[in-house]
Image (spheres, rainbow, N blue to C red):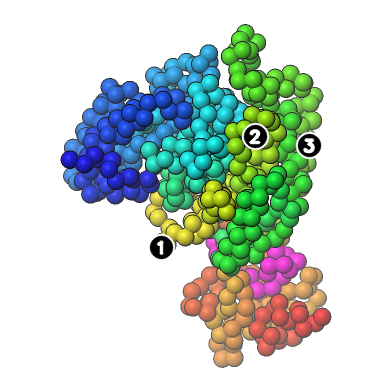
Amino acid sequence: MASPLASPLPTLADWQQAYRDGASPGERLTALHAQLLARGEDVAVIRLVDATALRARVAALQAAAAAHADRAALLRALPLWGVPFAVKDNIDIEGVPTTAACPAFARPAERSAEVVRRLEAAGAVWIAKTNLDQFATGLVGTRSPYGRPASVAAPERISGGSSSGSAVLVARGDVPFALGTDTGGSGRVPAGFNGLVGLKPTPGRVSTAGVLPACRSLDCVSLFTHSVDDAAALLALLEGPDEADAYSRFTPGPAAWAPALRVGVPASPVFFGDAGYAQAWPAALARLEAAGHRTVPLDFAPLHEVAALLYDGPWVAERHAVVKALLARQPEAFDPTVRQVIAKALDFDATAAFEGQYRLRALAAQAARTWAQVDVLMVPTTTGHPRFAEVDADPVGVNSALGRYTNFVNLLDWCALAVPAGQTPAGLPFGVTFIAPARHDAALARFARAWQGAGGAVPAAWPRSEPVLPIAVVGAHLSGLPLNGQLNERGATLLEATTTAPRYRLHALPGTVPPKPGLVRDEAHGQAIALEVWAMPQRAVGSFLALIPAPLGLGSIELADGRRVHGFLCEAHAVADAPDVSAFGGWRAYLASLR
């Protein structure tokens, strides 16, 4: 009889389908546990689930199945029923020691982390606690007494950290998803080195209660999967407020961007001598442009200055706050590089901490202007894929280089999603990361889904987005025109450029500053007028209405395909003496004729 694991099931969707088809979680999970045990010493794993605990969990799954009429009903109620997952060992599981890759620090958890509780409530089963850079301090995955996991693509190259083991278990196909953490790139760098999706949500979107802090004010729980759809479905289960987490601040954001985006990219990308990465990057740019997006080269110097604050600024004091007692009592318990990094906190005082906050505020205000130029950023996930020997020769320098395009994201409260982007000429995985403003997690996942080539409609299990009101603009609010900033300031996103139904006239209103048109409906002599439709968060509509001067207002506009949306209309009396510019087909074309 074939093993229940004879056919690998790498994705969450694969496991769910197997159970829909009648597979037994007892057989599958027991076989998986035996397979992991048979592997023997495994530097990616710190602890496997106890066999007795696994049997108890399987019994609970069977009881849940008995309480439902059929498998379809069961899986609707418990979408992760019987699905195994791995947990980075700085995340608590009740009754199981949390080591943070430091045996001297290990202590049994009194309660499971909120993220684990939510996954188990959906039917998932933890199978392993995974290795990490000690105290989640590093991007290399080599700073652990439990061993140094390698990339699944090349045994001589690092897996990346700090969530090294979690990425490896997913990449090997042991589990369909794993939890990591990400303060400065720890959920993205290992994804890039192992050909995975690495989702890092907006800080505060997912509870970090029960997660041993690295930098408490910046930490995020991250997800490793093979597909964006899987990562998004899991985020939909995990997101939401948590009263037990003082940093929980969940607020939904936009659902999507326009079909064609302005994508900011580094004007002068740096790969620190990795020729394979340097050759793979242009192919990623070409792929983006082939999809209809426009790349916008940007100066990343302000972002790199933000990134430097994470390890060279007073934020290292947050790491020290977690381990100061152990560091003072037993410094030899620490990995030497981790001890070196954390001990830098002693060079800063309270004044330096405030000075760092002031500098971050100034840089964040400068960085926020990025979103007036572009909709999303695309960066190489890392700057190259080092060998273990390279890390050994320069552990701090290599680590710093790997964080060039990751370390600034949480400090700016942004979200990010790492995705595979082909291979280097040597066959190593190459990945890119898409970065968006806070709360844009749902839109970012939708965009990355298209990058990954997923077809069909967005699945029902998707991160929440806030209610929006489509608003049609015909004049000074069009992209690039003087009042477009009023839309951007309110978080509006461009949905489409289209035209009205052929039933409108456009007039140039005299004396308006900046120049504005008036759109009026004319059944007898109307024509199609160019416009843009923007999705504005409903919470911002009131403040937007307050900016609209008479004789303009918002009314119902019929689009070319028969849909009706709210948009700018003008009182009829105001166009009596206003020049009719309808023949130009739109306000932008009319303005161009005046030049």
Judge whether residue 584 is colored magenta. no
> Residue visible at 57% across and 41% down?
189
Please name the residue that numbered disc 1 is placed on.
456
Foreground residue among 564 and 42: 42
In x, y percent, where is residue 569?
63, 74
- Which label's residue is closer to the chain start, 3 or 1? 3
> Residue visible at 71% across and 51% down?
269
Q: CA distance from mark 2 to mark 3?
A: 33 Å
Please name the residue that numbered disc 3 is placed on.
359
Frontmost of labels 2 and 3 is: 2
Q: CA distance from mark 3 to mark 1?
A: 45 Å
Left or right of 467? Residue 525 is: right
Q: Amino acid at mark 1?
A: Gly
Which segment is the magenta one?
Answer: 467-484
- Which label's residue is closer to the chain start, 2 or 1? 2
The C terminus, quarter of image: bottom right
Q: Does the CB distance between marks 2 and 1 fall below 8 Å? A: no
Foreground residue among 580 and 465: 465
Q: Amino acid at mark 3?
A: Arg
Q: Amino acid at mark 2?
A: Glu
Q: Which mark is residue 363?
A: none
Can the viewer see residue 505? Answer: yes
Please name the residue that numbered disc 2 is placed on.
390
